[in-house]
């Protein structure tokens, strides 16, 4: 994280209303203190990490792994958040206050999770906030090799499936800050102004109808 990415500092507990207004403006919340503790920062990276249409990289080994998982959406939202918030994880930042916010956003229909299961057990997943065709990813985790990557590929399939046939793709996955791991999957960095333009367009795209439908049996996972 860089000082120039911090746009504001707040002391009030974030609400669904304030969080949604911030997301729509290109900001996201994360605490400045140890382990994500207070005060609360509102961030907008100068260089934004995003996964754009056509950029997902699925290696042969990942494609093989993807066939070993079953996928679902919103079947274990709280469990996914709790796994991502595990204080034993390096860089843990999801506090009890932030967990409460995400659960409230989920209850209001804005936050969603994508789960990867193996043998009926949660193997990995991710969660974030969905605004039209943009998915603002907050965190991901895995208990089995490639499970979080597979969940990301499933999310891409959902977003692609929501596009109007023949129309220019306008969806986007916002990962906030890029990392070498995410770059290996096709994530790139774009300037904040370009992100703002894409954010505006993506918010007016169709929201994937698969959210809250449970098992994802009809999503195209790259010709598996």
Image: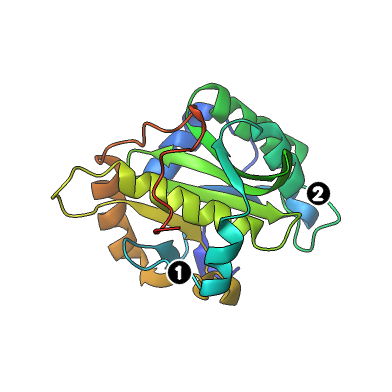
Q: Residue at x 17, y 45 (%)?
A: 165
Residue 100 image offset from top left, x and y in percent: 68, 30
Examine the image and state in which quarter residue 73 appears: top right
Quarter of the figure with the C terminus: bottom left
Residue 43, x across and y down, in percent: 52, 55
Disc 1: CA contacts within 10 A as few (<14), some (14-19) or many (>=20): many
Please report the residue visible at 51 percent of the width from the left and 64 percent of the height from the top: 5
Please tell me how many numbered marks the rendered image carries. 2
- Dot 2 falls on a residue whose secondary structure is loop
Query: Which residue corresponds to mark 2?
Result: 86
Left or right, residue 183 beside residue 68: left
Q: Residue furthest right?
A: 88
Q: Indicate the position of residue 108 as horizontal and vertical percent values.
A: 51, 22
Would residue 104 be found to the left or right of residue 160 on screen?
A: right
Q: Is 72 placed left or right of 135 in the picture?
A: right
**Mark 1 or 2, nearer chain start:** 2
- Asked if residue 2 can be seen in this view, the reply is no
Q: CA distance from mark 1 to mark 2?
A: 25 Å
Is mark 1 in CB contact (under 8 Å) with mark 2? Answer: no
What residue sits right under mark 1 in the picture?
Answer: 187
**Mark 2 Cα within 10 Å, few/some/many (few <14, many 20+)?**
some
Where 223 falls versus 187 (above or below)?
above
The quadrant holding residue 207 is top left
The N terminus lies in quadrant: bottom right
Write down the quadrant of residue 50 in the picture.
bottom left
Image coords of residue 182 (percent x, y) = 54, 69
């Amino acid at each position: 994280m860089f000082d120039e990415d911090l746009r504001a500092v707040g002391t009030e507990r974030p609400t669904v209303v304030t969080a949604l207004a911030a997301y729509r403006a290109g900001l996201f919340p994360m605490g400045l203190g140890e382990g994500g503790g207070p005060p609360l920062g509102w961030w907008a990276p100068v260089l934004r990490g995003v996964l754009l249409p056509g950029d997902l990289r699925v290696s042969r080994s990942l494609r093989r792994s993807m066939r070993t998982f079953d996928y679902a959406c919103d079947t274990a939202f709280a469990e996914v958040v709790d796994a991502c918030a595990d204080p034993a994880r390096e860089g843990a930042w999801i506090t009890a206050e932030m967990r409460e916010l995400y659960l409230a956003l989920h209850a209001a229909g804005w936050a969603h999770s994508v789960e990867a299961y193996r043998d009926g057990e949660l193997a990995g997943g991710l969660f974030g906030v969905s605004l039209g065709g943009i998915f603002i990813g907050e965190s991901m985790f895995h208990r089995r090799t490639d499970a979080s990557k597979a969940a990301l590929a499933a999310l891409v399939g959902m977003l692609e499936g929501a596009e109007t046939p023949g129309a220019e793709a306008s969806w986007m996955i916002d990962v906030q800050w890029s990392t070498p791991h995410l770059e290996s999957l096709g994530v790139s960095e774009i300037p904040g102004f370009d992100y703002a333009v894409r954010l505006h367009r993506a918010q007016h795209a169709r929201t994937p109808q698969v959210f809250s439908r449970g098992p994802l049996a009809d999503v195209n996972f790259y010709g598996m």
